Image (spheres, rainbow, N blue to C red):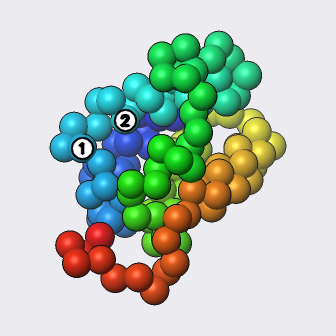
Amino acid sequence: MLVDRFYDLMETAPEAATIRRLHAASLKRSREKLFEYLTGWSGGPPLYEAKYGHPRLRGRHLPFPIASRERDEWLWCMDRALAEHLAPEPVKAFLQERFTALADHLRNRPDDVVFPDGA
């Protein structure tokens, strides 16, 4: 499954170390929430909305410093997970385009800000 592979990569790949640190020690809830969100986002039942209300993704991500680096690490994981998925290439290309726009929309910090904790 796409979400599981995405989080497996985030959990283990050094290329995703910065974005991984923004998550809880266990990725179980993150996996569940992303699956629920993507189910509705892709036209399936609105599982996420039924549990949590409107996603308001940008607002929900404001507590986390997301600049280009974090966006790029998230996309690195998603691009690799998509590449391994059995979906037809046009579907993968469409999803990559949409995920890129979504990830870029969630940036909430300029790239030149340095945080005291190194995040």
Q: From the viewer's perspective, is 45 left or right of 80?
A: right
**Residue beneath the point at 43% across and 39% down:** 5
**Residue bearing the label numbered 1:** 24
**Position above or below: 67 against 95:** below
In percent of width and height, residue 96 lies at: 68, 51
Front residue (pair 50, 47): 50
Neighbours of disc 2 within 10 Å: few (<14), some (14-19), many (20+): some
Upstream in sequence: badge 1 or badge 2: 1
Position of 116 with respect to 101 (left or right) is left
Classify mark 2: helix, strand or loop.
Answer: helix
Q: Which residue lies furthest to the right in this view?
A: 90
Q: Relative to residue 88, is residue 16 depicted above or below?
A: below
Location of residue 79 in the rendering, given as x and y in whole percent from the top left corner: 57, 53
Q: Alpha carbon of mark 1 to alpha carbon of mark 2: how far?
A: 8 Å
Secondary structure under the numbered disc 1 in the rendered image: loop
Label 2 belongs to which residue? 30
The label shown at residue 87 is none
The image quarter containing residue 95 is top right
Are circles 1 and 2 on residues that touch, CB within 8 Å? yes
Q: Which amino acid does label 2 sit on?
A: Ser
Question: Foreground: 20 or 63?
Answer: 63
Does residue 83 appear in this view? no
54 displayed left or right of 116? right
Q: Position of residue 107 (x, y in %)?
A: 55, 63
Q: Position of residue 17 (x, y in %)?
A: 30, 63
From the viewer's side, name the closer residue of 51 and 78: 51
